[in-house]
Image: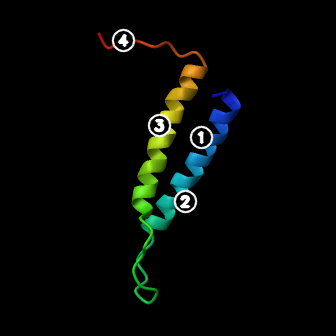
Amino acid sequence: MTLTTTLILLATALAVTAFAGWRGARPPDLTKGPRMTPWRFIMLLGAMMVFLLGIHLAALLGAPMRSPV
């Protein structure tokens, strides 16, 4: 994956995470019924993608890979 693709995906994942975090933090509106979209789970998936894409970005920029041993 190229640097441009990684940056676009990282920005998209950040936007999805922020939007889902905002929607998940809103109080429930009982007049509209239950929320059917799992916003907190979507936020966690987005945060996981931000983490993985951050690692990939660091590898693309030449961060040294170190062995845990």
Q: Which of 45 and 19 is in front in this view?
A: 45
Amino acid beneath label 2: Phe
Q: Which colour scheme is used?
A: rainbow
Q: How far is the residue under mark 3 from the one under mark 4? A: 19 Å
Q: Quadrant of the C terminus?
A: top left
**Residue 42, position in %: x, y?**
45, 56
Amino acid beneath label 4: Ser
Amino acid beneath label 3: Phe
Mark nearer the N terminus (4 vs 2): 2
Amino acid beneath label 1: Leu
Q: Mark 1 points at which residue?
A: 10
With respect to residue 34, does 12 lie above or below? above
User: Residue at the spot x=44%, y=65% of the render?
Assistant: 24
User: Residue at the spot x=56%, y=47% of the render?
Assistant: 14
Mark nearer the N terminus (3 vs 4): 3
Q: How far is the residue under mark 2 from the one under mark 1? A: 14 Å
Element on which disc 1 rests: helix
Q: Mark 3 points at which residue?
A: 51
Mark 1 touching mark 3, by CB under 8 A?
no
**Residue 28, position in %: x, y?**
41, 78
Element on which disc 4 rests: loop
Q: Name the residue under label 2.
A: 19
Mark nearer the N terminus (2 vs 1): 1
Please tell me the numbered disc located at residue 67: 4
Q: How far is the residue under mark 1 from the one under mark 4? A: 26 Å
